[in-house]
Amino acid sequence: MSTSSGALKKPQKTKTNPRVTVYTTPSCKYCKAVKQFLHEEGIAFSEVDVQANPKRFEDVFLLTGQIGVPQTKIEDDVVVGFDKKRLIDVLKAHDIL
């Protein structure tokens, strides 16, 4: 793309990416923290309430061996708990952040 000055314009990185899934329960304060962080960064995500849908939680348990929430699946990586630094690192590694 070129601008009126002839300089090339770098395409903007999109932060709306459905490759992020957060496994939560309604009463989990760390789940709320993960969702708030993603909202603040403008990152789209899908949410799975594992109390309402235990079969979906079984899938992530088989992947991680962990039973706690939140678990944030970012493509093939999973971040267990609210670990902001790890979330940032994994999101950057997948060019989402």
Image (cartoon, rainbow, N blue to C red):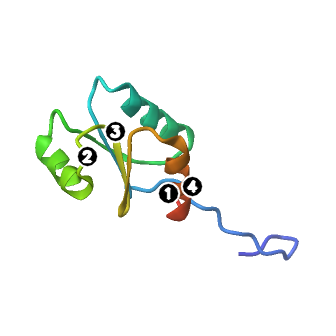
Nearest to viewer (mark 2 / mark 1): 2
Q: Position of residue 1 (x, y in %)?
A: 71, 75
Q: CA distance from mark 2 to mark 1?
A: 18 Å
N-term-proximal mark, 2 vs 1: 2
Image quadrant of residue 54? Answer: top left
What residue does disc 4 label?
97
Q: Which residue is at a point 88% across and 71% down the rendered structure image? A: 5
Quadrant occupied by the C terminus? bottom right
Question: Marks 2 and 1: CB-CB under 8 Å?
Answer: no
Label 4 or label 3, whichever comes before in sequence order? 3
Is residue 20 found left or right of 24 in the rendered image?
right
Q: Is residue 55 left or right of residue 22?
A: left
C-alpha distance separating marks 3 and 1: 15 Å
Residue at mark 2: 66
Indicate which label's residue lies in the foreground, 4 or 1.
Answer: 1
Disc assigned to residue 70: 3
Say which amino acid is labelled 1. Answer: Val
Which residue is found at the position 84% from the left and 70% from the top? Answer: 4
Q: What's the residue type where badge 3 is placed?
A: Pro
Q: Earlier in the sequence, mark 4 or mark 2?
A: 2
Secondary structure category for the residue under label 3: loop
In this view, the residue farthest toward the right is 5
Q: Real-space Cα distance between discs 3 and 2?
A: 10 Å
Q: Secondary structure at mark 4?
A: loop
Q: Residue at x 40, y 30 (%)?
A: 30
